[in-house]
Amino acid sequence: MRLILAIFLPFLVFFTIKKPIAGIICLVLQLTLIGWFPAALWAVYALSQYSTEEIIKAAKASSGVIE
């Protein structure tokens, strides 16, 4: 669901992954027609990084590693 959101409304993805400042910057970028495509790419990339971080956190938690 977040991937579809990242393509059509990129700025909202940043708010769902708890990065509001990046969301505001992305909104400003998205407001220009030329900037919408880079904003969508940036949102998809940020979403993939967030997913990777969540997987790593879950793996550390299940193995008992404390940060």
Image: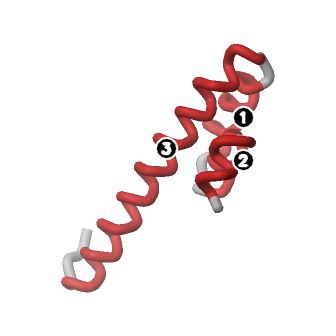
Graded by Cα atoms within 10 Å as few (under 14), some (14 to 19) or many (20 or more), the crowding at tag 2 reads many
Gap in angstroms between the C-alphas marked 2 and 3: 12 Å
Image location of residue 49, percent across then percent down: 41, 49
Per the rendering, the mark at residue 24 is 1
Gap in angstroms between the C-alphas marked 3 and 1: 14 Å
The single residue placed furthest to the right in the displayed view is 31
Q: Are marks 2 and 3 in contact (CB under 8 Å)?
A: no
**Residue on which disc 2 sits:** 12
Q: Nearer the viewer, residue 18 or 41?
A: 41
Relative to residue 33, is residue 13 depicted above or below?
below
Q: Residue at x 65, y 42 (%)?
A: 7
Image location of residue 59, percent across then percent down: 27, 75
Q: Residue at x 77, y 17 (%)?
A: 32
Per the rendering, the mark at residue 38 is none
Q: Nearer the viewer, residue 36 or 17?
A: 36
The type of residue carrying mark 3 is Ala
Q: Nearer the viewer, residue 19 or 54?
A: 54
